[in-house]
Amino acid sequence: MKAGFPENKLGDDITVIIGLRFYAIAQEQPKRVGIKGKPSDFGKVILVVSKILQMPWENKPIFDAAPDVNDKIIIDKAVAYIKSLAAAAGGSIPANKIGAALYTDPEILSDPDHDQIVVIALGNEVKAALSANGFTFEGTNYVAPQ
């Protein structure tokens, strides 16, 4: 709701959000008074919508066909981050480890472009840029050049 989804569109049928395109940020789960649980149940991370890009009922492209300068900056940041992850992992890193790091690594969480980096990090634009830098892809693994 805070990101701009119209309240009058929500009801008992949550499927109205299918097709919603948005940016999300990771936040610590709010503490709820009166809920019992183990200490490990608290402090978990939840995703919160930070910006709605396209409502489900809108039929419009959300991105231009060619990336603008800002998109290239975001792509370059994602490439540099994935390169550093692969180097730290010995040259090869699975996509799921990259995805997890995007939500847990303080380096990337502190980047002011974090939301946009998360959106494109595992996408085709970044894969193309990594390929141009000598990366190969074996299954779900991103493999740095030797």
Image (spheres, helix red, strand yellow):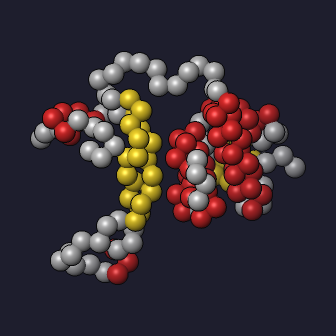
Asked whether residue 81 appears in the rendered view, the answer is yes
Residue 76 position, x and y percent, is: 71, 41
Does residue 135 appear to the left or right of 61 in the view shown? Answer: right
Q: Is residue 47 left or right of residue 1?
A: right
Relative height, residue 125 to residue 77 (above, below): above
Residue 146 in the image, given as x and y percentages of width and height: 87, 49
Residue occupying image coordinates x 40% and y 46%: 50
Q: Residue at x 81, y 39 (%)?
A: 133
The residue lying at 63 percent from left, 33 percent from top is: 71
What residue is at 66 percent from the left and 45 percent from the top?
78
Q: Is residue 89 above or below residue 124?
A: below
**Most distant residue in the right direction:** 146
Res 87 quadrant in image: bottom right
- Quick check: can you spot residue 127? no
Left or right for 13, reference 75: left
Q: Residue furthest bottom?
A: 39
* Number of numbered discs visible in the structure rendering: 0
